[in-house]
Image: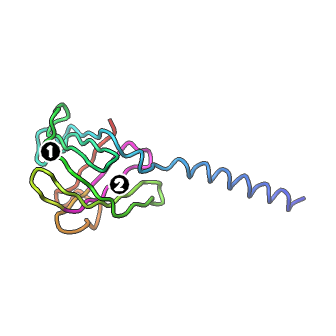
Amino acid sequence: MITGRLALLIVLLLMVSLSFADDKISIDDIYGIWVNSDYNGNYPPRAKEIHHPEDTSEWYYRVTDSEPGYTFKYTRTDSWHDNEGNLWIKYTWYCNEDSTSGYITIKFSDSGKTRESVYSGVKYPDEMSPIGGNYAIHYRQ
């Protein structure tokens, strides 16, 4: 009888763990509009970022702008979920307006409501941190 109860408990725990695994943010959840009005008018234009499934994006100087300041093309090089369920993605990027390129690491919160990023022109950033001036945080609109 104990063996049957133990087997039932294992099956129930497995079902619960699988149901939580489906709750992770996925690549399909990252596209759309991300905003942070604290960046309004600043360079680079990051008050509003719109990301598309074909891995392109527009960056805007102000949340209310209808024309982007810059447009980008991304190539995904790596992605993974951390222990908290956050989605991390590494991209190389190319800016259409000034032909610059570089590297960006983006962290999407497990809830899909917060997006943090750090970019560099020379290599993938070593940490997700405001130090160095290339850090940004945005919120799902």
The one nearer the camera, 16 or 74, is 74
Which residue lies at the image location 19% right of the left edge and 57% below the top edge? 94
Q: Is residue 1 rendered to the left or right of residue 23?
A: right
Asked whether residue 105 is drawn in magenta, I would say yes
Q: Residues within 10 Å of mark 2 (few under 14, many from 20)?
A: many
Disc tally is 2
Compared with 14, 28 (above or below) is above
- At 45% from the left edge and 58% from the top edge, which residue is drawn? 81
The kind of secondary structure element at disc 1 is loop
Quadrant of the rendering where the C terminus is positioned: top left
Q: Position of residue 80 (x, y in %)?
A: 43, 61
Seen at 27% across and 54% down, the residue is: 117
Taking depth in this image into account, of 66 and 139 the one nearest to the observer is: 66
Question: Residue at label 1?
Answer: 45
Mark closer to the chain start, 2 or 1: 1
At mark 2, the secondary structure is: strand
| C-alpha distance separating marks 2 and 1 | 19 Å
Is residue 24 found left or right of 117 in the rendered image? right
**Per the image, is 107 magenta?**
yes
Question: Residue drawn 47% across and 54% down?
Answer: 85
Q: Hey, which quadrant is residue 76 in on the image?
A: bottom left
**Range drawn in magenta:** 102-117
Q: Which of 130 and 46 is in front in this view?
A: 46
- Residue 108 picture location, percent across and down: 37, 50
- The outermost residue toward the right is 1
Please give the label number shown on residue 107.
Answer: 2
Q: Position of residue 31 (x, y in %)?
A: 35, 43
The type of residue carrying mark 1 is: Pro
77 lies left or right of 4 = left
